Image: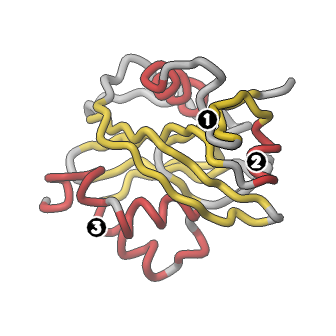
């Protein structure tokens, strides 16, 4: 199945196959979600079958919207697909752009709509094993410390989010 995502070619938004966007390092749309529970953030370890960054820890979930897919709908869809989380209200925090080498000659050059959701204690999850190897709730400060101490265990985008955009994404959770 071909997955067409919105990417910019010569300044024009164009549907492009996802792998092609990464091989060519094209600037493209993305969505990232962080699910919080107080000062704790839910992170996931990417499944070993992922075509880039397998086995690395990442934010709660992330993806590329399909061509003509609304980012809000995409964020909710991906939470359900990766983690089986449904009905969790999300708040749009910001649009962030970054470029990162993700290994094997692939580049993520993303314009990311970032969302945050506050999980109830009763949050139900059913991780999809094709997408997610493990999940972990971590105090945000512990996550930041662990990423600093062992960056190779985490995806490049999570490292960028924490180093350059933590205040925008997490706001008051940083003070807890």
Residue 60 image offset from top left, x and y in percent: 47, 44
In the image, residue 149 sits, relative to residue 2, either above or below, namely: below
The span from disc 3 to disc 2 (Cα, nearest Å) is 28 Å
**Residue highlighted by disc 3:** 141
* Percent position of residue 98, x then y: 51, 58
Q: For the view shown, which residue lies furthest in the bottom direction?
A: 149
Residue bearing mark 2: 50
**Mark with earlier residue (3, 2):** 2
Q: Is residue 148 above or below residue 52?
A: below
Q: Is residue 10 above or below residue 171?
A: above
Q: Which of the pair 1/151 is nearer the observer?
A: 1
Please state if 131 lies on the left or on the right of 141 as rendered: right
Q: Nearer the viewer, residue 72 or 77?
A: 72
Q: Residues within 10 Å of mark 1 (few under 14, many from 20)?
A: many
Image quarter in which the N terminus is found: top right
Task: Indicate which label's residue lies in the foreground, 2 or 1.
Answer: 1
């Amino acid at each position: 199945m071909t997955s067409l995502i919105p990417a910019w070619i010569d300044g024009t938004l164009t549907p492009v196959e996802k792998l092609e966007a990464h091989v060519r390092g094209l600037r493209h749309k993305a969505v990232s979600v962080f699910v919080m529970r107080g000062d704790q953030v839910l992170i996931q370890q990417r499944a070993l079958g992922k075509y880039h960054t397998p086995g690395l820890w990442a934010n709660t979930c992330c993806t590329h919207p399909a061509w003509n897919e609304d980012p809000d709908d995409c964020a909710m869809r991906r939470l359900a697909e990766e983690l089986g989380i449904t009905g969790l209200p999300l708040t749009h925090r910001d649009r962030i752009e970054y470029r990162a080498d993700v290994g094997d000659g692939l580049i993520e050059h993303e314009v990311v709509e970032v969302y945050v959701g506050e999980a109830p204690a009763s949050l139900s999850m059913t991780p999809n094993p094709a997408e997610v190897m493990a999940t972990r709730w971590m105090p945000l400060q512990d996550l930041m410390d662990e990423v600093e101490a062992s960056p190779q265990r985490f995806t490049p985008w999570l490292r960028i989010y924490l180093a350059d955009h933590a205040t925008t994404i997490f706001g008051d959770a940083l003070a807890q």
